[in-house]
Amino acid sequence: MSELNELASNDVEAMQKLQVAFKEIKRQLGRVIVGQESVIEELLIAMFSRGHCILEGVPGLAKTLMIATLARCISLDFSRIQFTPDLMPSDITGTEVIEENRTTGSREFKFLSGPLFANVILADEINRTPPKTQAALLEAMQERQVTVGRTRHRLPNPFFVLATQNPIEQEGTYPLPEAQQDRFMFKVFVKYPTYDEEFEIAKRTTALAMDEPSAVLTGEQIMELQTVVRKVPVTDHVIQYTLALIRQTRVTEPGIPKFAKDWLSWGAGPRAAQFMILGAKARALLYGRSHATVEDIQALAKPVLRHRVLTNFTAASEGITPDVVVEKLIAETPSREGELQKDERFKKIFA
């Protein structure tokens, strides 16, 4: 309770700023984007948690427009990279050129930065570019730097990569391996709009003029709010519940449920727990709470785990997706404090 009191006394103002900013960004996005409430929420949770997102959906669902509009709402440098099969790493990181010094007449190398040197990067159709260029982007995501020649160049802060990919086209694509997808905090599914939402989309986008969003936060304010998110306390019970969900996906470990062994060929690693807990902290603040709960973990389990668990042929033949597996894990994992410790199966999982 002392941690909760400390947070309440020292960071109440910052927490209120985060809640206000969240509501205002959603309002500004709503001037351009119709619906997609859960997608917007997950994007903002990732942003305040200092994570990256990959958005998957069929063409025409405003994935690119959503990311570009979000960048305008937070007053940051924005760069859009259209990934193509002929894109090279230097096309996104930048390159060194030889420049003549007019004063001395000598020649020297000068670094020309690429489109990665921005705060918000839209990696459009990331699965259309070869692995070499994907790897250059993923180094930037993980290390927040790029290496050109023998020199490392730091990227600006804050730095977010929001990638999109089309799940229905396989010709001429290079799907990201699971190890590379693991660098993304969330994998967010962008679904078709409802009838009412599609009616509003058709009405707005065929009119003479459209609303423009206003900037809500600066880069400095975002970094301050990211610090506040990390201060949110999490009880041991919430951490144990998180680990219970994740460790049940590892098919080589003892005590996991039969359906996981039947449907999974690989499970999530420790990065899943880190992202799930960070996301729960951010979600708690966005909903006006000073501490993360099991409900926050459950709400974020799918976007965190769906690209970190690998289903096998048996699951595919039965129409079982990673989301179905996560739903079943949540349904069969005790959520009340003390229940996990009493369950004999979880004693093996926690051993």
Image (spheres, grey):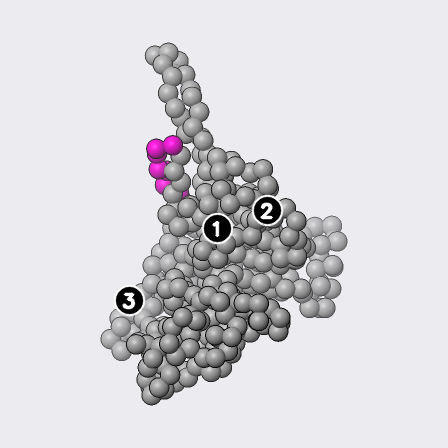
The residue singled out by tag 3 in the image is: 10
141 to 107, vertically: above or below = below
The residue singled out by tag 2 in the image is: 128
Foreground disc of the pair 2, 1: 2
For the point 46% across and 38% down, the residue is 93
- In the shown orientation, is residue 56 left or right of residue 249? right
**Disc 3 from disc 2: Cα separation:** 47 Å
Residue type pointed to by label 3: Asn
The residue singled out by tag 1 in the image is: 161
Residue type pointed to by label 2: Arg
Instruction: Tell me where residue 102 sits by quadrant.
Output: top left
- Few, some or many residues within 10 Å of mark 2 (<14, 14–19, 20+): many
- Nearest to the observer: residue 166 or residue 221: 166
- In the shown orientation, is residue 347 left or right of residue 96? left
Q: Earlier in the sequence, mark 1 or mark 3?
A: 3
Residue 71 at what x, y percent from top left?
Answer: 52, 50
| SS of the residue under disc 2 | helix
Q: Are marks 3 and 2 in contact (CB under 8 Å)?
A: no
247 to 121, vertically: above or below = below
